[in-house]
Image (cartoon, rainbow, N blue to C red):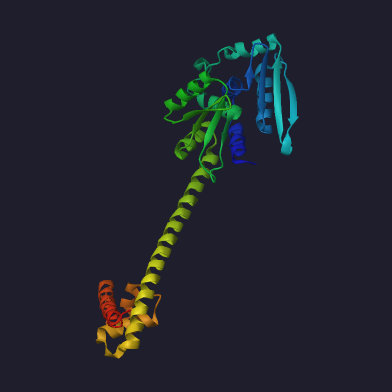
Amino acid sequence: MSFSNEVKSEIISAVTDKDKKFACLYGLILFCNRITHDEICFQSENRQVADMFSSLVSEIFKNSVKMSEDVIERKKGTSLYSFNITGSENVKTVIDRFRIDPDDREIDLKNIDNNSIANFLAGVFLSCGSVNNPESGYHLEFVINSGTLCDDLNRILTSFDLKAKTVTRKNNNILYIKESENIEEILTFMGAQNSTLEIMNIKILKDMRNRVNRVRNCDMANLNKTSAASVSQLQDIRLIESNLGLENLPDTLREIAEARLENPEFSLNDLGEILDPPIGRSGVNHRLKRIKQIADQIRKENNE
C-alpha cells in the first residue's frame, strides 16, 4: 500500500460520529469529478475511499438517493471505482442538502463549523488529494477542477497558517504544500496522526544519514589532504636521505623525518603525539617546513 493510501486509510478510520460523517461527505461530493443538475460523478482509485463514499451516501440519505456503481479495469491491474447519482430529482436531493450550486461550486461555510472543519478537509483530501512518500520528498496536493473551489480551499488552509501554492496542470488547479511541517500539521488535523509520526521519524533518519555523510565526506577530504601532504613530505625526506643522510640533520628534524617515514598515514597531530617529548601540530608543521627548505636547496643545487 502506498503512503498516500495509508494516510487515507487512517483518515477513514477517524471519521466516526454523524456530524463528522456529514462534513466528510460534503467534502467528498463538493470536490468530486463532476456535478451537474442531472448527474453527480464520484471516482476514486482507492477501494476504501469508494466504499466509504457509498456507505456515507446510504447512511445520510437513506433510500432517498439512488446510485449506480461501476468498476473500470485499467492498465497495470489498477481499478477505477465510479459512482453515479443520476436524474434531476436524485441530484436535487443531494445538492439541496449541501447547498451546492452545480453552475458555481464553492465552499458553503454554513455546512461546517469549528468542530467539523477537520472532517470536511478530510473529505476533500479523500476526494482529490494525495501525499508523496516522505522517503522521496515532501509534497501534498489537491487536484481541483474548479478555480473557485481552489481559492476557497486555499483561504481555509491559510486561516490555519498552512501555506499552500497553486499551479495549473492539465486543465486542473493544483493546490500543493511542500513544507514538511505544514504537511505534518494538516495530516494531524485530518486525523492521520500515525502518518505524521512516520514523516517525523523519516525526517530524523534522513537528518542522521546526512550528518553521517557530512562527517564521512569531511573525514575523506581531510584524509586526502593529509595523504597529499604526506607524499610531498616523504619525497623531501627521501631526497635528503639519499643526498645528505638523515643522521646529518639536527636531532629535532631527524626525529620528525624518521617518524614520518615510519607513519606515512599519520596526521600532523598524530605525528606530534609519538615524539618524545610530544609536540603540537604547529611544532610538527614548523619542522616539516624546515625539512622542505633543505630539500628545495638540494634540488636547486642539483638543478632539479
Picture coordinates of residue 206, whole percent (x, y): 49, 50
Is residue 286 depicted above or below 244 in this figure?
Answer: above
User: What residue sits 56% from the left and 39% below the top?
Assistant: 132
Is residue 252 depicted above or below 3 in this figure?
Answer: below
Quarter of the image where one finds residue 23 = top right
User: What residue sits 25% from the left and 83% below the top?
Assistant: 252
Asked if residue 31 lies left or right of residue 50, the reply is: left
Asked if residue 46 lies left or right of residue 121, the reply is: right
Is residue 32 depicted above or below 300 in this figure?
Answer: above
Please tell me which residue lies in front, 253 or 154. Answer: 253
Picture coordinates of residue 137, whole percent (x, y): 52, 43
User: What residue sits 32% from the left and 82% below the top?
Assistant: 257
Please tell me which residue lies in front, 274 or 234. Answer: 234
Is residue 172 depicted above or below 274 in this figure?
Answer: above
Please tell me which residue lies in front, 225 or 16. Answer: 225
Q: In the rendered picture of this protein, how many numbered marks are placed on residues?
A: 0
Quarter of the image where one finds residue 224 = bottom left
Picture coordinates of residue 54, whole percent (x, y): 69, 24
Picture coordinates of residue 220, whole percent (x, y): 43, 64
Q: Is residue 16 visible?
A: no
Quarter of the image where one finds residue 169 = top right
Asked if residue 67 lies left or right of residue 260, the reply is: right
Q: Quadrant of the C terminus?
A: bottom left
Asked if residue 290 lies left or right of residue 230, the reply is: left
Question: Residue reaching furthest front?
Answer: 303
